Image: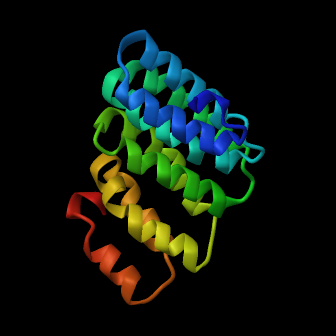
């Protein structure tokens, strides 16, 4: 029934929910169909964001295959020219992979690159929201990220939170 939903966004979500209740080959078939539905989105940021649903489930059952999907999604994200949209999509991917250190570590450099390419209060918010993720995966990137944030009290808090060895 989930596979018959016409709108790809909702079909992906429903197929992922079904996959959570399945196992084995049926689960993998549902996740593959969900991933295919995510790729039907017309904009790169939406492809990545929607694909986060099946990636979250796949990461728990087949981390190696999740690595392949994440690598494919990072390539898709690179085609998003708008840094804020790319940052939001990669932030979503980082959040769903957070329980899996090897997976989130793959996402973080692309997220930082997108953040450093953008400016404004919404980029600053994503910097603050993902600062701890960067700390856990790539602490050497913290200083450049903190310095990219708009100068002020929030930037000072970020700079103060950088471990001495990260400076």
Q: Position of residue 139 (x, y in %)?
A: 32, 53
Q: Position of residue 41 (x, y in %)?
A: 72, 42
111 relative to 58, above or below: below
163 relative to 1, above or below: below
120 relative to 107, above or below: below
Q: Position of residue 164 (x, y in %)?
A: 21, 64
- Taking depth in this image into account, of 30 and 84 the one nearest to the observer is 30
Residue extending farthest top: 25
Q: Position of residue 107 (x, y in %)?
A: 46, 42
Residue extending farthest front: 1
Quarter location, residue 98: top left
Residue occupying the point 57% across, 62% down: 116
Residue occupying the point 57% across, 32% down: 2
Residue extending farthest right: 42
Coloring basis for residues: rainbow
| Image quarter hosting the C terminus | bottom left
Q: Is residue 67 left or right of residue 60?
A: right
Residue occupying the point 53% across, 32% down: 15
Q: Is residue 101 left or right of residue 143?
A: left
Residue occupying the point 64% across, 27% down: 36
| Image quarter hosting the N terminus | top right
- Taking depth in this image into account, of 46 and 88 the one nearest to the observer is 46
Residue extending farthest bottom: 152
49 relative to 34, above or below: below
Disc tally is 0
């Amino acid at each position: 029934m989930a596979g018959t939903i016409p709108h790809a966004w909702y079909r992906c979500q429903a197929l992922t929910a079904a996959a959570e209740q399945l196992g084995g080959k049926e689960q993998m078939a549902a996740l593959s169909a969900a991933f295919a539905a995510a790729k039907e989105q017309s904009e790169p940021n939406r492809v990545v964001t929607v694909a986060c649903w099946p990636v979250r489930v796949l990461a728990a059952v087949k981390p190696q295959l999740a690595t392949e999907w994440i690598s494919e999604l990072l390539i898709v994200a690179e085609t998003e020219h708008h840094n804020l949209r790319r940052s939001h999509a990669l932030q979503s991917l980082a959040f769903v992979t957070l329980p899996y250190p090897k997976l989130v570590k793959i996402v973080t450099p692309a997220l930082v690159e997108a953040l450093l390419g953008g400016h404004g209060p919404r980029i600053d918010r994503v910097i603050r929201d993902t600062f701890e993720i960067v700390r856990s995966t790539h602490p050497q990137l913290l200083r450049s990220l903190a310095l990219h944030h708009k100068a002020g009290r929030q930037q000072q808090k970020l700079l103060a939170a950088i471990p001495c060895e990260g400076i």
